Image (cartoon, helix red, strand yellow):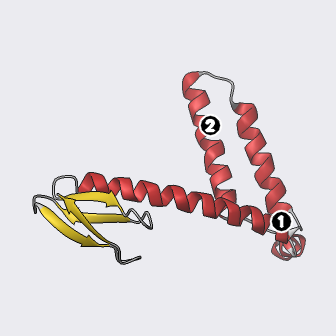
Amino acid sequence: MREKFARFMYGRYGIDKLGYALIIGSMIITLLTSLTGGDGNIVSMALLIWEAYRFLSRDVYKRSRENQKFLSISAGIKKKLSLLKNKLRDRKTHRYFECTTCHNTLRVPKGKGEIRVTCPVCKTVTITKT
């Protein structure tokens, strides 16, 4: 039986990060609709069908491109959430601001008065008050 399944799956795309996200999204929608009594089961089933299509697809190149696009979008979101988490954690001890030249986020200690800050990326020197 295991060999038959392995032969069936040969050349198929399989599961990736986008696939996991679709399955988790489907489960969340199902949970929310069961708690609220809404009608979201169609959306949940559509996500599962889309994942099954991607999982069994033989067009590996297209599925890989879809996954790469998803990963690039999710990386930006993760970066913003991580920065927000750090800002909340350091809100009493540090101040965050953006470099005027390269728009890199810089962190400086609070309560030091007026200081010179050099951006590590573009080497622009900025005088700022903390």
Q: Quadrant of the N terminus?
A: bottom right
Q: Could you tell me the amino acid type at mark 1?
A: Lys
Which residue is located at x 42 percent, y 66 percent? Answer: 101
Front residue (pair 115, 84): 115
Q: Nearer the viewer, residue 89 or 2?
A: 89
Residue 77 percent across, percent down from the top left: 52, 55
Badge 2: residue crowd in 10 Å (few <14, some 14–19, many ≥20): many
> Could you tell whether 92 is left or right of 42 in the image?
left
Image vertical order of residue 41 relative to residue 102, above or below: above
Mark 1 = which residue? 62
Residue 15, position as x, y percentages in the image: 72, 64
Residue 124: x and y in percent read 35, 73
Which label sits in the foreground, 2 or 1? Answer: 1
- Foreground residue among 77 and 22: 77
Residue of label 2: 29
- 32 vs 128, left or right, is right
Q: Is residue 11 above or below residue 97?
A: below
Q: Are there few (<14), some (14-19), or many (20+) residues within 10 Å of tag 1?
A: few
